[in-house]
Amino acid sequence: MKNVNEKSNKKLTRMNSLKDILVSQYFVIIVILLVMGITISFLSPVFLTSRNLLNVLLQTSINIIVAVGVTMVILTGGIDLGVGSVVALTGVTLGTMLKANFPIPIAFLLAVLVGAFTGIINGLLVSKGKVPAFVATLGMMSVARGLSLIITGGRSIYVFPKSFLNFFGIGYLWFIPMPVVIAIVVVIVAHYILNQTRFGRYVYSIGGNAEAARLAGVKVSSMLIMTYMFAGVTYAIGGTILTARLNSAQPIAGNGYELDAIAAAVIGGTSLSGGVGTVWGTVLGALIMGVLRNGLNLLNISSYIQQVLIGTVIVGAVLIDRLRNNKA
Amino acid sequence: MKLENILELKNISKKFGAVHALNGTDFHIKKGEVVGLVGDNGAGKSTLMKVINGVYTPDSGKYIFEGEEKHIKSPRDTAALGIEMVFQDFALLDNLDIAENIFLGRELYKSVLGINVLNRKEMAKESEKIVREKLNLDIDSVKSKVKNLSGGERQGVAISRALLFDPKLLILDEPTASLSVDKIKNVLNLIKKLKELGIAVILISHRLQEIMEVCDRISVMYRGKIISELITSETDISEIVTCMVGGNVKVY
Ligand SMILES: Nc1ncnc2c1ncn2[C@@H]1O[C@H](COP(=O)(O)OP(=O)(O)OP(=O)(O)O)[C@@H](O)[C@H]1O
Ligand SMILES: [Mg+2]
């Protein structure tokens, strides 16, 4: 009798896990994305044109890139509020270098180094300094914004070499806009890191239970520093693309990017408690955000109302994440 | 027959703030020996084991493994020596699957087109082998998330992890605390099997019955120090209890 019970219990957990897959993550997200797309296409015939869809991808590419970085941070159980400021800081670094006639690759590399450096600082504060990620990155948000304003004296930097604009902003590879190409590369690299390297396993394990990871011999501090550093690099790539798209480096750029990035991760199934989530989920989450914004624009909904709606969606996604966690 | 010590600790101390968790204690275990470590809650048993496993570095004292003094900095160092530990709360990761837990910190790689990628197939196969053959565990798949496992299954995974690389010294910190009677028997049988294979085992438990059943020798810890060493065949439970409350000091 007991055996039978055990067996049926096992079956139940197996069915549950199948149900889990269907109910959580991709399935639901894709359905939501489709429903949103269909609804908007009824309301606005422009939506389904290939031109508009490419436009959505283009506008989403920066968010995809930085959201991938944020996802890795959240997977460790952390959070990063400095996204937008670091995007601006790396952008003005790049702009200043280009204006000083440094070669494009050198200027880009320096921007990446600046992004990585901010990440290392965050990682050190969180791992060695035991500062909550929320506080450490909130500080970075202010510091990086301040530095951007200092470097530029509060003014934007304009007009960059055509080849720079082409490669990072307005060019195409075949018919795909370069920012989308770069986003695809970032996503593939991040997927490889998270799923095919030890480092990736450790990111998940630290978010799952940092103490257990440490007992298993994982060097938790170094792994955290590397994670924040990787995230900083994605912000630098985002800042570079933004600079090229606007053909200007602005110290006030990237305002609020952290919200969109965190929203993309959470909508895509990344748990704010850490340890659960995927890069692909985040890509889908970013696309939902992108379609939503695009749809609201097509329907001529005022940007004030948009702010209210998008804020609501973000909090709603976090709420659903919490409910999902409490059930488990 | 004279067996040599595989591990010897001398005068080990460890403080946490004002708490003297370990108070200049000695400890030793011979090759293939099964030593029971008993003592009241908070006596310092887990702390001593974590020193052996490299989770904590002691404030002072000597660590001698196979006759050589070692300076241990992390669990990686002791894993390299052949020391493995199953922690009191198993220290598993709920969000990872069984194979990922077993291989955490020592993942296998393979090369695909010159790029290193995790060798999931091999890790799953090895995990399967250990879980089924060594432990006789009835688990659906090593791809199940640990979150969905029962207490006994979790414990099986933790032991599988420790057995992965044929350790020379295995530490089991209260492995039976959350198990049903027949599962406890499995663990005790496993310890006997390991002993036959020449693996030294340290068993921590509050159930003196099972300590008496499988251990060759019993070390009694009291307030951060091992105060008595008892030979199982020459003692009984009431003597152990007397030692545990600090009422008797006996050293062989
Ligand atoms: N990481 C730590 N930080 C602070 N104090 C600790 C830490 N680990 C252990 N202690 C303290 O050290 C003492 C010994 O603890 P330990 O866990 O070694 O006892 P134990 O013999 O394993 O007890 P139990 O039978 O309850 O598992 C206790 O007073 C405990 O509170
Ligand atoms: Mg203990």
Image (cartoon, coloured by chain):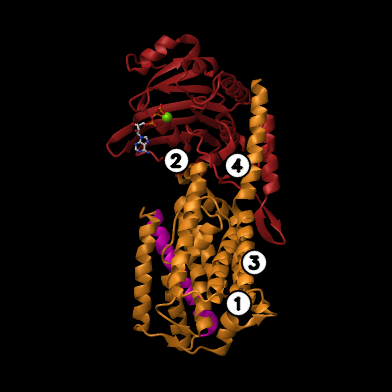
Chain colours: A orange, B red
| Amino acid of disc 1 | Asn
- SS for callout 3: helix
Marks 4 and 3 sit apart, C-alpha to C-alpha, by 36 Å
Position of the C terminus of chain B, as image quadrant, is: top left
Tell me what residue is drawn at x 36 percent, y 63 percent. Answer: A138
Q: Looking at the picture, how far across and down is residue A154, in whole percent? A: 35, 82
* Quadrant in the rendering for residue B222: top left
Front of the two marks 1 and 2: 1
Are the numbered discs 2 and 4 placed on the same chain, yes or no?
yes
Tell me what residue is drawn at x 48 percent, y 43 percent. Answer: A326
Chain designation of label 3: A
Marks 3 and 1 sit apart, C-alpha to C-alpha, by 17 Å
Checking the image for residue A38, the label placed there is: 3
| Amino acid of disc 4 | Lys
Looking at the image, residue B40 sits to the left or right of residue A2; the answer is left
Marks 4 and 1 sit apart, C-alpha to C-alpha, by 40 Å
| Amino acid of disc 3 | Ile
Front of the two marks 4 and 3: 3
Specify start and end residues of the magenta stretch as a single range.
Answer: A103-127
Tell me what residue is drawn at x 59 percent, y 70 percent. Answer: A183
Q: Earlier in the sequence, mark 3 or mark 1?
A: 3
Instruction: Give the residue pinned by disc 2.
Output: B55
